[in-house]
Image (tube, rainbow, N blue to C red):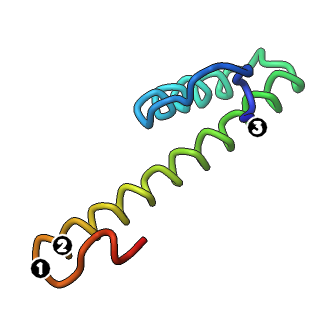
Amino acid sequence: MTAGRSKGTPPSSLQQDLERLEQIVHALEQDDLDLDRALALFEEGVTRLRDARGRLGEAELRLRQLREAADGSVEPADLG
């Protein structure tokens, strides 16, 4: 389970993660944020950033596979 999400909550999309990261950055920039809340937000932000990077890496790999398949050189099934 990732920070800030409850069990049974469906995984968020890349767009949702990016929007939430913007909200987290804005909240962390506030002067009146207490330390416990700041740490919780930072932890959630790190988790969402890691998830987003993973999704982008998977998408990049998939695009590479599709491009190679379109060239006729390699089929996607051959790479996985």
Residue at the image point whose x is 45% and y is 60% from the top: 57
On screen, residue 66 versus residue 39, left or right, reads left
Which residue position is annotated with label 3? 43
Vertical order, 44 against 69 (above or below): above
Which residue position is annotated with label 2? 69
On screen, residue 33 versus residue 13, left or right, reads right
Residue at the image point whose x is 47% and y is 34% from the top: 18
Q: Position of residue 71 (x, y in %)?
A: 10, 78
Number of marks in the rendered image = 3
Task: Give the secondary structure at mark 3.
Answer: helix
Q: Closer to the observer: label 2 or label 3?
A: 2
Vertical order, 30 against 55 (above or below): above
Q: Position of residue 10 (x, y in %)?
A: 57, 24
Label 1 to label 3: alpha-carbon separation: 44 Å
Amino acid marked by disc 2: Ala
Task: Give the secondary structure at mark 2.
Answer: helix
Amino acid marked by disc 3: Glu
Chain-order first, disc 2 or disc 3: 3
Residue at the image point whose x is 88% and y is 26% from the top: 35
User: Given contact means CB atoms under 8 Å apart, are the residues at marks 1 and 3 in contact?
Assistant: no
Which residue position is annotated with label 1? 72
Vertical order, 57 against 31 (above or below): below
Amino acid marked by disc 1: Gly
Chain-order first, disc 1 or disc 3: 3
Q: Quadrant of the C terminus?
A: bottom left
